[in-house]
Amino acid sequence: MNAQLSSLDDDIVLQALSITQKASETARRFFRQNVAVEFKSDESPVTMADKAIESEIRVALNAAFPSFGILGEEHGTENGENPDMWIVDPIDGTRSFISGHPLFGMLLGLTRNHQPKLGIVAMPALKETYVGGPGLGARLNGKKISASPCTSLENAIVYINEASRIFANNEPAFRALLGTGQTTRMAHDCYPHALLAAGHVDCVIDYDLKPFDFLPVAALIEGAGGLMTDWKGNALTQNSDGRTISAATPQLHAQMRDLLGGIS
């Protein structure tokens, strides 16, 4: 892995992977147990597991990288002025987690001067760990992966994430998306994006994401040779509106961007 990820300090990558893997073990201990659920002001759920796992990750990051900042879903921002920022989502897919569904993830990313440089997508229940970034390549459990060569939306496998929210807020976009791709599936959370990085899915449309949802994923997808932007094709930042297109190739991305651009 060191040779493949040499454009970012190997020690950073390896320590980040170690931190993620230990936190994944914690997630597995909580999974399918009686974990109390609270609901935030936006009606999104949060559990003791979310808070405990993020705390564990923060302690480990602060010990290994004391000069770096951290942005996390549950515990906010510390050292936010730092050019190197860790991005943490301890359980991406809490609704999956609390319902016993194994497709919840764990996200850890690193941005440098606001640009995604490293992304780790761990799937604790599946024991899969994806890692990659711009110039780093991408790997799944140590094996090299890459996005598919698909260039035609007509032939693509398309995932629509957060379909109910898209339908509720932009029905024309939802109906247009239903008519795309050779195969169209509906899903949630980070796993479809990870499958895109591994070459199994060609395009993923997402909606209403937060920076800790998309910044780690964007780095992974770029490392795998794909691209992830907002619906207008702009690079993703902490201020992006949460509507994203992930695509295996520039040609496929352009077709999806054109489709949504005429509606959104």
Image (spheres, rainbow, N blue to C red):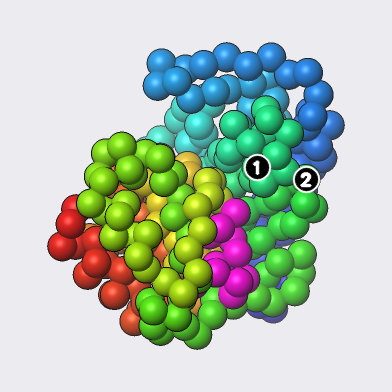
- The three-letter code of the residue at mark 2 reads Ala
Q: Amino acid at mark 1?
A: Phe
**Magenta span has 198?**
yes
For disc 2, the marked residue is 125
**In the visual, does 16 lie left or right of 158?**
right
Is 11 drawn above or below residue 7 in the view shown?
above
Q: Residue 104's mark? A: 1
Answer with the quarter of the image where residue 147 lies: bottom right
- Give how far across and how far down residue 19 sits, in percent: 73, 45
As rendered, which of 151 and 48 lies closer to the eye?
A: 151
Q: Residue at x 65, y 42 (%)?
A: 104
Residue shown at 78%/18% (left/top)? 34
Instruction: Classify 10 Å Cα crowding around label 2: few (below 14), some (14-19), many (20 and above).
Output: some
Mark 1 is surrounded, within 10 Å at the Cα level, by few (under 14), some (14 to 19) or many (20 or more) other residues, namely many
Residue 81 lies, with reference to residue 111, above or below; the image says above
Q: Earlier in the sequence, mark 1 or mark 2?
A: 1
Instruction: Give whichever of 209, 156 is nearer the camera.
Output: 156
